[in-house]
């Protein structure tokens, strides 16, 4: 009989290995040997991944089994003494035809929100990652998020719905917030920031703010008093302008079209680094429109003119002729300044 060298490894090493495995496979390691039976529980990490389940089954039964097992794993963790869940990763990738089934999406919404609201094991989470696909098909109520001990929150592909004022959570320990392919109200994002006094890093990637909030100038400002690093990439719903109030800002990154942007309550010279990448994939026909586009560009760049490091780059699809036209517009405006 061959020697079991794997079990002789220190528990911290085995915990690190299990922390990268989906929950279904991690639980199955309990059949290897007696010491492995509770090893997945003590790792402090749980990866709930629907890709671990066979795609050959009917989508309804597969969804039911996946959420049933997810709830069972969280109940087992809650019942274990002296074991605390520090990190939870939830991944749900629906079959291609699920986005057409409205009734099924609503069932997934209910199960997803119930998973976080009714599980005692998630109350002490320090890091939460939620990824769903297809994006913008499934909604998550902000009120169900385990906010007490949360330090890092990563949400991908979700429609974030605001909670009632009486049930608004407080993110007292939140330090990092990343939203990718999410739809959220600007007022709701502001509410999260307001309840997170330690929030230092915010990344908004392909985030769309609700259109109904763009009619009021007060709703186009984001106040981040403690944020030192902010990244905006292809953010939608801000075509009427955006004001950023970030007195502690040190690093800023932007990727998208030139838009009316104002940095308030922050001297540009105190910004250590600003990386600005603009999409200029069209050349306006009228001279007035050309002037407007260039004004937006220079107004945006001018707001970070005093940064210690300023990187400005362009993406100019459309061939050499279009790139030359854009270059001509930039040179024309430089003469005016």
Image (cartoon, helix red, strand yellow):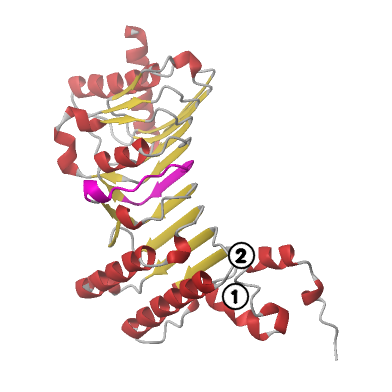
Q: Residues within 10 Å of mark 2 (few under 14, many from 20)?
A: many
Residue 176, compared with residue 115, is above or below; it is above
* Quarter of the rendering containing residue 38: bottom right
Q: Residue at x 18, y 20 (%)?
A: 288
Q: Locate the N terminus and report the quarter of the image it occupies.
A: bottom right
- How far across and down, in percent of the image, does residue 74 sit? 47, 71
**Which residue bears the numbered disc 1?**
26
Q: Any magenta on residue 181? A: yes
Q: Which residues are magenta?
A: 164-182
Q: Which mark is residue 19?
A: 2
Per the image, label 2 sits on a secondary structure element best described as loop
Q: Position of residue 92 (x, y in %)?
A: 40, 68
Point out the image quarter for the C terminus: top left
Percent of width and height locating residue 82: 60, 65
- Which structural element holds mark 1? helix
Camera-side residue of 80 and 290: 80
Indicate the quadrant where residue 108 lies.
bottom left
Residue placed farthest to the top in the image? Answer: 336
Q: Earlier in the sequence, mark 1 or mark 2?
A: 2
Height in image: 20 above or below 298? below
Question: Viewed as shown, does residue 28 lie left or right of 214?
Answer: right
């Amino acid at each position: 009989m061959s020697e079991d060298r794997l079990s002789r490894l220190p528990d911290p090493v085995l915990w690190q290995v299990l922390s990268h495995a989906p929950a279904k496979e991690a639980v199955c390691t309990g059949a290897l040997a007696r010491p492995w039976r509770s090893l997945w529980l003590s790792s402090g990490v749980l990866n709930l991944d629907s890709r671990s389940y066979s795609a050959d089954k009917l989508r309804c039964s597969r969804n039911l089994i996946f959420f049933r097992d997810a709830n069972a794993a969280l109940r087992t963790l809650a019942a274990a003494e002296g074991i605390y869940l520090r990190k939870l990763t939830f991944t749900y990738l629906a079959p291609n035809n699920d986005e057409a089934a409205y009734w099924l999406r609503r069932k997934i919404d209910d199960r997803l929100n119930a998973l976080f609201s009714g599980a005692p094991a998630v109350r002490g989470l320090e890091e939460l990652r939620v990824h769903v696909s297809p994006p913008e098909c499934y909604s998550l109520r902000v009120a169900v998020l385990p906010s007490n001990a949360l330090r890092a929150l990563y949400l991908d592909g979700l429609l974030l719905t605001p909670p009632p004022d009486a049930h608004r959570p407080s993110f007292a320990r939140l330090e990092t917030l990343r939203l990718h392919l999410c739809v959220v109200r600007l007022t709701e994002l502001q509410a999260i920031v307001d309840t997170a006094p330690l929030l230092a890093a915010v990344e908004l990637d392909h985030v769309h703010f609700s259109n109904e909030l763009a009619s009021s100038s007060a709703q186009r400002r984001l106040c981040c008093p403690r944020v030192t690093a902010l990244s905006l990439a292809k953010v939608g719903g801000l075509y009427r302008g955006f004001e950023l109030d970030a007195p502690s800002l040190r690093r800023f990154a932007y990727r998208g079209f030139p838009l009316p942007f104002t940095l308030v309550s922050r001297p540009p010279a105190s910004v250590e680094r600003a990386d600005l990448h603009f999409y200029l994939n069209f050349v306006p026909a009228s001279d007035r429109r050309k002037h407007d586009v260039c004004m937006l560009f220079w107004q945006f760049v001018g707001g970070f003119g005093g940064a210690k490091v300023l990187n400005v780059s362009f993406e100019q699809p459309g061939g050499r002729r279009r790139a030359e036209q854009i270059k001509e517009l930039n040179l024309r405006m430089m003469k005016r300044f």
